[in-house]
Image (tube, rainbow, N blue to C red):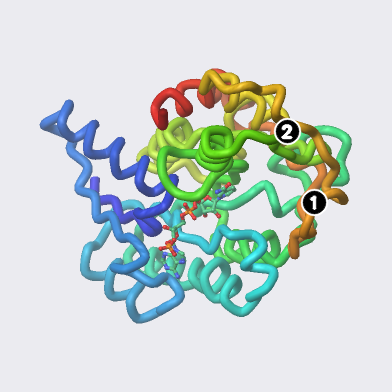
Amino acid sequence: MRLLLTGAGGQLGSEIARLVAGLNEKRARARVALLALDHSSLDVSSRDQVLSAVLSFEPDVVIHAAALTAVDSCELEPERAYSVNALGTRNVAEAARLNGSHLVYLSTDYVFDGRASRPYLEWDEPAPISVYGRSKLGGERELDGSHTVIRTAWVMGRTGSNMARTVLRLGRQTRGELRFVDDQRGSPTVASDLAAKVLELATARRPGLFHVTNQGEATWFEVARQIMAAAGLDKGRVVPISTGELDPPRPAARPANSVLENAALRLSGDELLPDWRESLDRLVAEIA
Ligand SMILES: NC(=O)c1ccc[n+]([C@@H]2O[C@H](COP(=O)([O-])OP(=O)(O)OC[C@H]3O[C@@H](n4cnc5c(N)ncnc54)[C@H](OP(=O)(O)O)[C@@H]3O)[C@@H](O)[C@H]2O)c1
């Protein structure tokens, strides 16, 4: 199988590349030929670059993990957000169509407004409340139903900018209290678990929309406490605040509830990802 990966330098992309390298070592036959393109080797907002990369490599499958993921930057720079997240996905979809590749697009829990009092299903109506959410939903709409859309949430990995790395840094370098919001609920997800399921769905070319997150739900306050405890630090230093108490306030609105029910996987009888606490403890041990 020939696999082209965009956003290969990101949290998810780097885990997918690691996983493929590991699988190739184990299985000399049935190897995956991977072209892992990070931002410096492919800018998805350039139609010419995308067409040239895809049409020259001729992948069977494209995993499109590149995105502008900084939610507040998207709010401040909407043109950039749309050119990467929405138009960039149009470019990748066009190239995949011309080459006959199966396309897997990564999307987000932030396509929902967060007003539901239960977890969101794949079949619930999106209603994004931020530029990031709207631009990622724009990307979803560039794919037809024969391809794969995977919505995930609250991703934390070994690299990049994420909650696990932030809490560990603050926990070790400061002494005072650490304030985290307790009124936003979501589905914490560890990048390596997500990468394995993305690769599974991609190689099987499973069509349709899937929510893929670790199981269980939490607020950021609960996630921060779990990280401190897993690192052997004092979780009592983590103090709950409301979103309204954030100083300074964040430019982009966040959904109060963006818990994703992994209904499509569950109802199909597919194995679900482990509970977030188990995977996060493992991640903290790896980072430490
Ligand atoms: N992180 C989360 O909590 C989260 C939650 C829900 C959904 N998702 C989705 O999951 C996917 C993977 O996210 P992630 O956590 O791996 O994010 P990430 O670590 O920010 O990785 C995204 C990568 O895309 C690259 N990129 C940005 N603009 C680009 C462009 N114009 N062309 C090519 N590459 C570009 C970035 O490179 P530079 O940093 O060098 O610009 C970065 O390496 C994304 O589609 C994201 O929307 C993420």
- Observer-nearest of 142 and 232: 232
Residue under label 1, please give it: 246
Determine the residue positioned at 52% across, 70% down: 84
The answer to which image quadrant residue 71 occupies is bottom right
Quarter in which the C terminus is drawn: top left
Q: Secondary structure at mark 2?
A: helix
Q: Residue at x 53, y 26 (%)?
A: 280
* Disc 2: which residue: 221
Question: Can I make out residue 272 in this image?
Answer: yes
What residue occupies the far front of the structure in this picture?
Answer: 175
Spatial CA distance of label 2 from label 1 is 13 Å
Q: Position of residue 198 (x, y in %)?
A: 44, 40
| For residue 152, side relative to residue 32 (left or right) | right
Side of 156 where 11 appears, left or right: left
- Which residue occupies 23% across, 32% down? 22
Element at badge 1?
loop
Quadrant hosting residue 48 = bottom left
Amino acid on which disc 1 is placed: Leu
